[in-house]
Amino acid sequence: MPNLSKSVDTGRIGAAVEHLVAASCILASDAVLNVSTSLVDDEGVDLVFHRRGRSATLAVQVKARSTDTVSVQGGKFLGNVRAVTFTARRDLYTLFVVVDRLTAALDTVFLVPSVDYDRLASTTGKGMRRIAASLKPDAQDKWRPYRRPFKE
């Protein structure tokens, strides 16, 4: 029988990080931003941001990695987006975020417009679009322009 605990934990942690990102953005904007979540995640949209008094929205797919993972501890963010749910468009961004699960603190993020992600991400043999970005402060890889501390 397969071990399902990892996939169950991954889903729970992913949902928790999405809500943590949403709540943090609302608080940091002094409640100017509002965030909606998708009931069904079949289009690769986890959060939809909208500013009070405006009609424009920004759709965001969130991908998180914990500070206790081997890749993050080694100074690299590795993340995959399923090609079947990914369609680049002007109003969609992908937010790759490093989270400390013990403190629920959001650390380094890569906020990448989906059009740029489509152009820069590699494609795996398993139908995934992949980011392999350095977390090292002095790194100048292709993902560097999108990297910033979450607090910004």
Image (cartoon, rainbow, N blue to C red):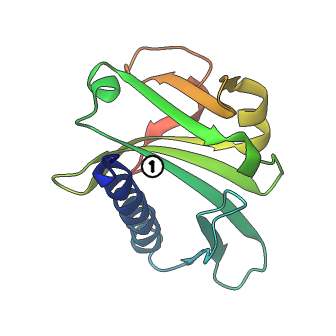
Tell me what residue is drawn at x 64 percent, y 29 percent.
Answer: 126
Q: Nearer the viewer, residue 3 or 24?
A: 3
Residue 146 position in % (x across, y down): 58, 34
Residue 24 position in % (x across, y down): 39, 66
Kind of element beneath mark 1: loop
Q: Nearer the viewer, residue 45 or 112?
A: 45
Question: Which amino acid, by three-letter code, is at mark 1?
Answer: Glu
Is 21 situated above or below 50?
A: above
Left or right of residue 133: residue 136: left
| Other-residue count near label 1 (Cα within 10 Å), few / some / many at <14 / 14–19 / ≥20 | few
Residue 129 position in % (x across, y down): 67, 32
Left or right of residue 69: residue 50: right
Is 26 situated above or below 4?
A: below
Label 1: which residue? 152
Residue 28 position in % (x across, y down): 41, 67
Q: Quadrant of residue 11?
A: bottom left
Tell me what residue is drawn at x 71 percent, y 44 percent.
Answer: 113
Tell me what residue is drawn at x 45 percent, y 63 percent.
Answer: 18
> Which residue, as the protein is rendered here, is positioned at the far bottom?
53
